[in-house]
Each structure stands twice: as C-alpha cells, then as structure tokens.
Amino acid sequence: MSPTPPPYLTDAEVDGICFPLVQPFAQRRFLQSLGMIVKARRNGRALVARADWERVMTRSGPDDRPMDSGTGPDVQAYLQLINSRKAQGHGAKAQR
C-alpha cells in the first residue's frame, strides 16, 4: 500500500508545476492564474491544497459544475424577463 500524500503540494511539486519560475511570488501568481486558491507560507513559498490542485486540473470546462445541476442562475427565465421588458418599452432608450 502506498503512503498517503500530504494534504498540500510539496515544494518540489510546486517547483515542477511552475517551472521555469523560481521566485515564490511569481509561482504564487502563476498558480492563482490557473484558478487555484494559493496562500503564502511564512517563507513566501506557495501553499496549495492538494484537493484544490486536483479540482482545477480535472475540470472539463470553464466551470466545474455541470450545466444542468440546477445550482446556477436560470438563464432562460432571465432572457424571458428581458424580452418581456423590451416588448413593454422598459428599455434604457424608452426612459430617455
């Protein structure tokens, strides 16, 4: 049985992900640009939860939630509201 990995990425893993960046601030900025939550350790090095790394690297699109999950905004209802207001003359041009 293999040992359980630590809950955070090791410095060697962060170095490998961020290569050729070596400065801690540049590495943190790069990891944040990938969509990860990055904290700074006392020595300035990046602190990234392994679960967050896996979440970012395994998502299939710009949003990791499925489109039909029911947890997001109801786009169809919003479009119907906008179209009904346009039909009633409530647009920005009608108020001027």
Image (spheres, rainbow, N blue to C red):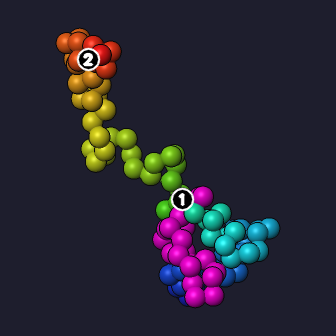
Question: What secondary structure is found at the residue carrying circle 2?
Answer: helix
In the rendered image, the vertical position of residue 32 relative to residue 16, given as above or below: above
Q: Nearer the viewer, mark 1 or mark 2?
A: 2
Q: Residue at the location (64% across, 81% down)?
A: 45
Quarter of the image with the C terminus is top left
Q: Quadrant of residue 86?
A: top left
Amino acid type at image mark 1: Gly
Count residues near mark 1 (Cα–Cα under 10 Å), then give few for <14, some for 14-19, many for 20+.
few
Residue at the far left: name it.
Answer: 88
**Quadrant in which residue 14 is drawn:** bottom right
Q: Which residues are magenta?
A: 33-54
Q: Position of residue 1 (x, y in %)?
A: 55, 86
Above or below for 59 versus 78 = below
Q: Which residue is mark 2?
A: 95
Q: Percent from the top left, x then y, of residue 63? A: 45, 48
Is 69 situated above or below 6? above
Q: Gap between marks 1 and 2, in whole Å? A: 41 Å
Q: Which is more toward the observer, 82 or 3?
A: 82
| Residue 90, visible in the rendered structure | yes
Q: Is residue 4 left or right of residue 95?
A: right
Closer to the chain start, of discs 1 and 2, is 1
Q: Position of residue 3 (x, y in %)?
A: 56, 88
Q: Is residue 49 magenta?
A: yes
User: Do residues under tags 1 and 2 come within 8 Å of each other at their CB atoms?
Assistant: no
What residue sits 58% from the left and 88% below the top? 42
Q: In percent of the image, x 23 and y 12: which residue is there?
A: 89
Disc 1: which residue = 35
Q: Classify mark 1: helix, strand or loop.
A: loop
Name which residue type carries label 2: Gln
The image shows residue 47 at horizontal and vertical percentages of 56, 78
